[in-house]
Image (cartoon, rainbow, N blue to C red):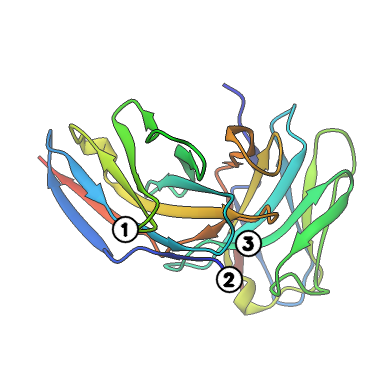
Amino acid sequence: EPEVTQTPSHQVTQMGQEVILRCVPISNHLYFYWYRQILGQKVEFLVSFYNNEISEKSEIFDDQFSVERPDGSNFTLKIRSTKLEDSAMYFCASSEFGLAGPKNIQYFGAGTRLSVL
Amino acid sequence: AQKITQTQPGMFVQEKEAVTLDCTYDTSDPSYGLFWYKQPSSGEMIFLIYQGSYDQQNATEGRYSLNFQKARKSANLVISASQLGDSAMYFCAMRSGSARQLTFGSGTQLTVLP
């Protein structure tokens, strides 16, 4: 069964460093998403991406964050200068379509746990 | 504004019994979708079941069913014949209107007792 793949599973970084989280969405999916989950809290939306551009972003997704689809398979989230409060589980998700119907179901990867020291 | 409320932080159920996890939602859009995800202790988010606002019948997927009551704005997850492997955090989520983002509830930690 196709799945969303995320690497690495755990990333440890020093405050102020740049990190890139990587995702390979399901191959025929057109919409891609990043979410984060701070330990013990609910899952929060960061950004959605379609047709090589951002379609929606939340208030969390400030200038420190960027997303890119550098090739036909990868989808990345970059945090330019990490802060302690960026420590969280980051989930990538993808869906075939974006709006109504079962094809808008978002399938999640296993997540990358980011620890900022 | 979209809002999802899960009022049960924790639930216990005996193995082989059924359990209902509550979810209420709020949206002004007539078109929306409701989702349930399972998050085991290992951390991944597993899609379980989807219900569209215009679907006439309640969604079912194996042992999972969604009790959709539109007038009450509730979308409760029913797990039949609970198994030990069902022990996990369960999240209700919604996408509404033209937004593609999912809004999640705070989750319910389900523990299945042997």
Residue at image location 27% in from the left, 41% down from the top:
B78
Which amino acid, by three-letter code, is at mark 3? Phe
Label 1 resides on the chain identified as B
Q: Which residue is mark 1?
A: B108
**Closer mark to the observer between disc 3 and disc 2:** 2
Callout 2 crowding tier (Cα within 10 Å): few <14, some 14–19, many ≥20? few
Q: Which mark is residue A45?
A: 3
Horizontal arrangement in the rendering, residue A81 relative to residue B85 (left or right): right
State whether discs 1 and 2 lie on one chain. yes
Horizontal arrangement in the rendering, residue B113 relative to residue A59 (left or right): left
**Distance in Å between CA atoms under marks 3 and 1:** 19 Å
The answer, for residue A108, to whether it is visible in the render is: no
Q: Position of residue A104 (x, y in %)?
A: 63, 39
**Distance in Å between CA atoms under marks 1 and 2:** 22 Å
Displayed quadrant of residue A27: top right
Which amino acid, by three-letter code, is at mark 2? Ala
The answer, for residue A1, to whether it is visible in the render is: yes
State the SS at label 3.
Answer: strand
Label 2 resides on the chain identified as B
**Distance in Å between CA atoms under marks 3 and 2:** 14 Å
Asked if disc 3 and disc 2 are in contact, CB closer than 8 Å, the reply is no
The N terminus of chain A: image quadrant? top right
Label 3 resides on the chain identified as A
Q: Which mark is residue B1?
A: 2
Residue at image location 55% in from the left, 66% down from the top:
B2
Callout 3 crowding tier (Cα within 10 Å): few <14, some 14–19, many ≥20? many
State the SS at label 1.
Answer: strand
